[in-house]
Image (cartoon, grey):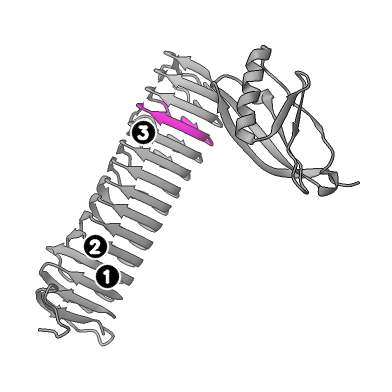
Amino acid sequence: MSIIGKIHKTGILTYNNYIIKYIIIKFNPRFAEKVYNLNVFIDFSEAMLYNSFRDTLNKFTHANINLCSFSQVLFSERNERMCKAISLNLKQVNRMKTIENTTFDEERALYGSKNAILRNCVFDGAADGESALKESTDIEVHNCFFNLRYPFWHDSDLKITGSEMTELCRAALWYSKNITVTDTKLHGIKALRECSNVIMENCDIISPEFGWSVNGIIMKNCNAVSEYFMMRSSGLHFSHVHFKGKYSFQYIENAVFDNCEFETKDAFWHGKNIIVRNSIIKGEYLAWYSENLTLENCTITGTQPFCYCSDLKLINCKMVDADLCFEKSEVNASILTPVISIKNPRTGIIYVPEVGELIYDDAEAQGKVIVCDLHNYNGNAD
C-alpha cells in the first residue's frame, strides 16, 4: 500500500478568541495531482462565522479553501510535485473558558483544565486541598491569590500575571514548561523546579531553593531572596535582577547576566560557560571551581574570590576588599583597582594598578602579575 502523505507541521493560531489547531500534510508526489476531502469537526453554529473564519485562514495559509459542507472542507495548494492539505481539529476549538471571582479549597480543584482564564480567584480555605491546576494546559491566571500547596505541576503553556503565591504556597511550579510569570509574588519555598522555557518579569521572589534544574529561563527586573538559588540550571539570561542570599548559581551552565546586583556567598561554584556584564557582586568565596567564566565591567567585593578556576577572564573589573585572590586558577584579568593580595595563580596574566601582597609559595603557580596603569601600559611591568 502506498503512503498518501505524512504530517509536515502542526501548529496553533487564534481567531476571535478561538484556539485552532492545524496540521499541514505533505502528500506523496505520485498523488500530487489528486485532490482530497479531509474530514473535520466543526463547532461553529453559524455559517457566517465559519465563512469569516475561512477567509482568515485563506490569508494565513495562502491556500484555496472551498466550503463543501459543515463536516468536510476541501483544501488544495499545488506546485510541481507537492500538494499540501490542512486539517483542522475543531473538536478542540472552544472559547477560552473564563472563571472569575471564585474561591477554591478542594483537592485538585481544577485538575486537567484546558484553555481556561482565571481572574480574581482565591485558592484557600478549610479543605486545604493541594494541586489545584495540576496537569493543565493553556491556562491564563490574572490577579489570583494562592495560599495552598503545589498549584502548578506538570502544566504547559501557562501565563500568570498580577498574582500572589504566599509562604504557604509551597512548591508552586514544578515539572512544567512554557511558563510566563509577570508582576507576581512568589513567596513559598521551592517555588520553581525542573521546569523549562520560563520567563519572569517584574516579580518578587522570596523562596529558599528556588529554580533548581530549570532549563531555559529569562528573568528581568526581578528581586529575589533565596538560598541555593538556581542550582543546577542551564540556559539562564538575567537582566536587572537583584538577588540576596547564600549559595547562588551553583553548578549552572550556559548563563548570561547583565546589569545585575548580587549580595551572596559561594556564588557560581562549579558553574560552566557564564558571562557577567556590568554587574555588582558582593560576597566571599566567589566562583570557586568554575569553568569558562567571564566578567566584564563588574565590581567584585569580598574575600578569596576566584580560586581553583579554569579559563577565567576579568575584563576591566573593580575589586574591593579582595584578598587571597586567584589561588590555583587559570586566569587572564585586567583589574582597575588595587587588590589586597593575590595568591598562587596557576597560569595566565593579571594586570592590576597596585597589589598589597603577592604570595607565591606553590611551585606550580606560574601565573604572572603585572602592576601597571592599564591606560598607559606599554608592555613593560613596573
Instruction: Identify the magenta region.
Output: 148-164
Q: Nearer the viewer, residue 185 or 382?
A: 382
Q: What is the quadrant of the C terminus in the image?
A: bottom left
Asked whether the beta carbons under mark 1 and mark 2 sit within 8 Å of each other, the answer is yes
Residue 125 shows up from this direction: yes
Image location (x, y in percent) of residue 219: 35, 44
Disc 1: CA contacts within 10 A as few (<14), some (14-19) or many (>=20):
many
In the structure shown, which secondary structural element does the residue marked by tag 3 occupy? strand
Q: Which of disc 2 and disc 1 is earlier in sequence?
A: 2
Residue that mark 3 sits on = 182
Q: Is residue 234 above or below residue 75?
A: below
In the structure shown, which secondary structural element does the residue marked by tag 2 occupy? loop
Q: Which of disc 2 and disc 3 is earlier in sequence?
A: 3
Name the disc covering residue 285, or none.
2
Q: Residue furthest bottom?
A: 363
Mark 1 or 3: in front is 3
Disc 2: CA contacts within 10 A as few (<14), some (14-19) or many (>=20):
many
Q: Is residue 259 above or below residue 152?
A: below
Q: What residue is drawn where x is 26% and y is 87%?
A: 363
315 displayed left or right of 188: left
Disc 3: CA contacts within 10 A as few (<14), some (14-19) or many (>=20):
many
Q: What residue is drawn where x is 23% and y is 72%?
A: 333
Residue that mark 1 sits on = 307
Image location (x, y in percent) of residue 301: 16, 59
